[in-house]
Structure formats: structure tokens, C-alpha cells
Amino acid sequence: MSAKTTRRKTKRKSIGFFEKYPRKFIWIGGLFFALLYVWAFYEFFVNPTGFRWRAIFGDANYPEGYEIHGIDVSHYQGEIDWDQLKNSMIQGSPLRFVMIKATEGSDRLDENFNNNFYNARENGFLRGAYHFWSNKSSAREQAYYFLKQVHLEDGDLPPVLDVEHKPANKSVEEFQTDVLTWLHIVEDKYHVKPIIYTYYNFKDAYLGAPVFDDYPYWIAHYYVDKVKYKGAWKFWQHTDAGKLPGIKGYVDFNIYNGSYYDLKQMTIGKRKDVW
């Protein structure tokens, strides 16, 4: 009588992630992500030279020696109660000007722009409109889109180019040429030099060519007692933690480096001498 051979069926045991990879690689990966988290937290929440981050240190700082105050707004401020805002005071001085986000790239209009732009003038503020630079479309497309959507009038502040990022695939010289293309197109329309908004490290690194010094400069530098930039500037966005009646949440506070008369002389329709 022959014995039957029974083949034993074996099941492959699934290998877990921690068994598959040596423990040392797990520790290395964990350390990498921990360092990445620390770096990101510092850059976005602590670094005093950054500016696109929400305040975590309490009330806004108010630079001393400046009397002309303003704000900049976009859809992030939601619906603004202009009746309350028009009587606002900052450090005992009235709110004088409002910069309003208009466009971004070549196809994005801020959803609150038209309402904010109309109400700013109706409530007695000097108003301005800014375009947020995008690296995803050409300078010409962005300039003509801004001009299509924004119709500045005599008495308005010059148009503003908000530029904060350089494309990685372009040299500094190519990037500067693109920025100048936008500036020249818009300047030809309004016959006034646009304002350049950026933070001071970015200007030093990418917009340091002498030609850019011909334009009024709006500098963003938060939580410092004075601007570290050594060149000439007209506006200073000094905090993103401002609070005012009529606006829910935070709003950016700005000051103008000069008198109210000087500020009005900057507006469209006024005679322009050197800045």
C-alpha cells in the first residue's frame, strides 16, 4: 500500500512596513520630516523678513513718526462695512488711503474688487488698485488683463504691481525684463509710473537693477521698528495684524513716507516730477 504525499500549503506572511525597512531608515526619515517641519514653521510664522504670514505676537506695531495711514484689502477681508471704516483712526490719525486687489495672472479678478473699488472713493479715501504677479502667464497677458478689468481715474493712486516670486526657470535678467514689460505697458496707459510692491529681500535679490529705482516702491516688512531697506521708498506695509471697525478679522496696515499733500501729488492727473 503506497502512502500519499501531502503537499503542505504555506501562506506567505505579509511583511509590514517597519519590518521591510531597517529601523535606521525609519529614524532618518523621521528626522528629515521633523527638520522640514521646523524649517517651514520658522519661514512662515517666525522669520521677521517674511511677510505673507498671520500675526502670532499679539497687537500690531505702529511705526513712529508717520501720520499718513492706509490699508490694503481683497476678498480675504470679506464684505466691508464702509460706513464704519470711513471714520476709522490709526494711532490718532485718520485712515487716508486704501489699496485694493484687482487682478491676478491673466484671468483672475478678485471677487470683491469692483465693490471695494467703488466704495473706497465714495467714502472719501484715496484709492489704488494692484495686480498680483503670476509666473504662469506672460507679462503682456497680465498687463492687458489688468487694463481690461481696472479703470483708474484722475485722483486715483498709480497702479500697483505686486511681485513676490521669480520663476525658477528664468534668469534674473529675463525676470527683470518681464517685470519691466508689465510696467511699461501700464505706464503707457496711465502716463504715471506704477508702484512696485514687494518685500525688501526680494527687491535686493531680483529687482536691484537701477532702472527699478525710477519707480515708487511699496515695501513689505513686518514686526520691525524701522525699515531695513536702505533705498528710497514711498509706502511701508508694516503689519498684517491690523484691526479696524467695519472689517472682520485682520487687515494689512500701511504708512506713506511723506505728507498728505505729497500723497495726493502722486495721484493720476497730477503733474509728475521726480519721485
Image (cartoon, rainbow, N blue to C red):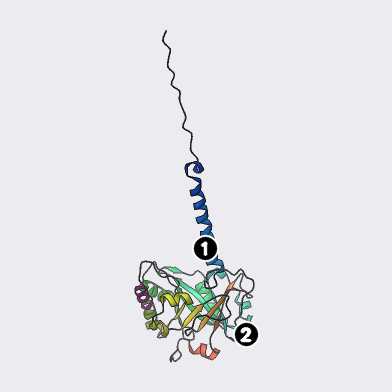
Q: Up-down: is 25 above or below 252? A: above
Q: Is residue 204 left or right of residue 169?
A: right
Report which residue position mark 2 lands on.
93
Q: Amino acid at mark 1?
A: Trp
Q: Residue at x 64, y 73 (%)?
A: 59
Marks 1 and 2 sit apart, C-alpha to C-alpha, by 39 Å
Give the overall secondary structure of the magenta segment.
helix
Q: Nearer the viewer, residue 185 or 269?
A: 185
Q: Is residue 171 magenta?
A: yes
First in sequence, mark 1 or 2: give its number.
1
Which quarter of the rendering shows the N terminus?
A: top left
Which quarter of the rendering shows the C terminus?
A: bottom left
Q: Residue at x 55, y 63 (%)?
A: 41
Which numbered disc covers residue 137?
none
**Picture coordinates of residue 6 (x, y %)?**
44, 18
Q: Please give the range of residues in magenta.
A: 169-180
Q: Up-down: is 268 above or below 224? A: below
Report which residue position mark 1 lands on.
39
